[in-house]
Image: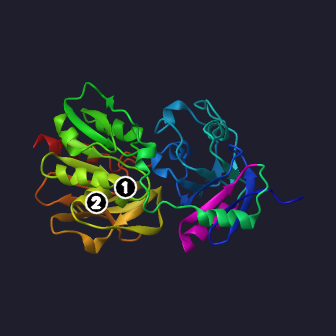
Amino acid sequence: MPPSPHFLALADGSVFRGRSCGAPVDTVGEAVFNTGMTGYQEIASDPSYAGQIVTLSTAEVGNYGCNPEDMESRALFLNGLVVQNMNRASNHRSREEFADLLARWGKPALDEVDTRRLVLHLRDHGAQKAYLHASDEPVSEAEAVERARAWEGLDGQDYTRRVADPEPRDWNPEGDRFVVAFDFGIKYNILRGLGDCGIRVRTVPSGTSAADVLRLKPDGVFLSNGPADPVAVSGAIAAARELVGKVPLMGICLGHQLLGLACGARTERLKFGHHGCNHPVKNLLDGTVEITSQNHNFTIVPDSLPDALELTHVNLNDNSIEGLRHKTEPLFCVQYHPEAGPGPHDSRYLFGQFRELMNR
């Protein structure tokens, strides 16, 4: 039997063959892996994956299908997907096959890939530029490798403007506390988490100024998750810096990094990032351990923390920074996702903590 004409080519020259099972198009992106056992639709619709080709480490994908309720944003934002087995759905909630959802949004995917070997390769050699060949265009492995190497990559790129909703949106109009949320690629489950605490939310585009935010007279300001390099989101860093001390602030994921940068810290790239829903994090304030959902390629540099910031959470896998709070101002942030979607709910109390901060 001849080898499949479809494959994933990495910039280091490695090639992993598979079968096209999404949109029949080619793409470039940063190859990363996610260790979650479930939640493939939420992963595909998480705007933080913009610019990335995601490999799922779990072997069986698509089994429970897809439905509108499990979308985490208005579209699919990842560049491509790689799995071992793409299965047909068998679940009463399913309204669409996962492969069909990918194809409908123009997202290429490969199955029948040795994802165990691919994940180990990315773990050992790091996330890297990649070219996913899923079309009928005749592309050689060598040509695909060169196309991967020629891609500009994610470093220095502001992807938030590509994924954020350009129009303000209102959420939970019955809430008795009002929060303005910077939309850098905000997930619906974050909005649900805030709403469950009685918070009324208005999302604003990523380029909104601090002055425009303050004109809305919010009780608090939230900085959301989002894709790519935090340093490139310079306008949001400036806005956050101006907001510190004027209104209670909370940040998640990219928002955490932006608040750190606004307070004078630095960020750096992780070797292969944190992508999954089983990352242990220690809360240094009370000694408890939380299992968390994570999705980020960058982290705050520990020795860059200014005196004004206190370390509150650390990752028990690699000791990276997972949470910070300001020593004198109403501000805290976490690198992980307390809303999960998919993942555990150990950290959902943080939304209530944000409300308490606004009540003081």
Q: As drawn, is 328 to the left or to the right of 124?
A: left
Identified at 58% across, 36% down, the residue is 66
Question: Whole-percent x and y of residue 53?
Answer: 58, 55
Identified at 45% across, 57% down, the residue is 278
Q: In this orientation, does residue 226 appear? A: yes
- Determine the secondary structure under disc 2: strand
Which residue, given by chain and number where applicable, does mark 1 sit on?
A: 336
Q: As drawn, is 242 to the left or to the right of 335?
A: left
Compared with 273, 180 (above or below) is above
Q: Which quadrant holds residue 11?
A: bottom right
Classify mark 1: residues with Cα within 10 Å, few (<14), some (14-19) or many (20+).
Answer: many
- Determine the secondary structure under disc 1: loop
Q: Amino acid at mark 1?
A: Tyr
In this picture, which residue range is highlighted in magenta? 114-135
Compared with 69, 320 (above or below) is below
The mark found on residue 146 in the picture is: none
Q: Is residue 117 magenta?
A: yes
Identified at 63% across, 72% down, the residue is 12
Question: Is the Cβ of the residue at disc 1 closer than 8 Å to that at disc 2?
Answer: yes
Compared with 30, 211 (above or below) is above
Question: Whole-percent x and y of residue 188?
Answer: 41, 38
Which residue, given by chain and number where applicable, does mark 2 sit on?
A: 323
| N-term mark: 1 or 2 | 2
Report the number of numbered marks: 2
Q: CA distance from mark 1 to mark 2?
A: 8 Å
Q: As drawn, is 152 to the left or to the right of 26?
A: left
Question: Whole-percent x and y of residue 122?
Answer: 57, 68
Question: Whole-percent x and y of residue 48?
Answer: 45, 50
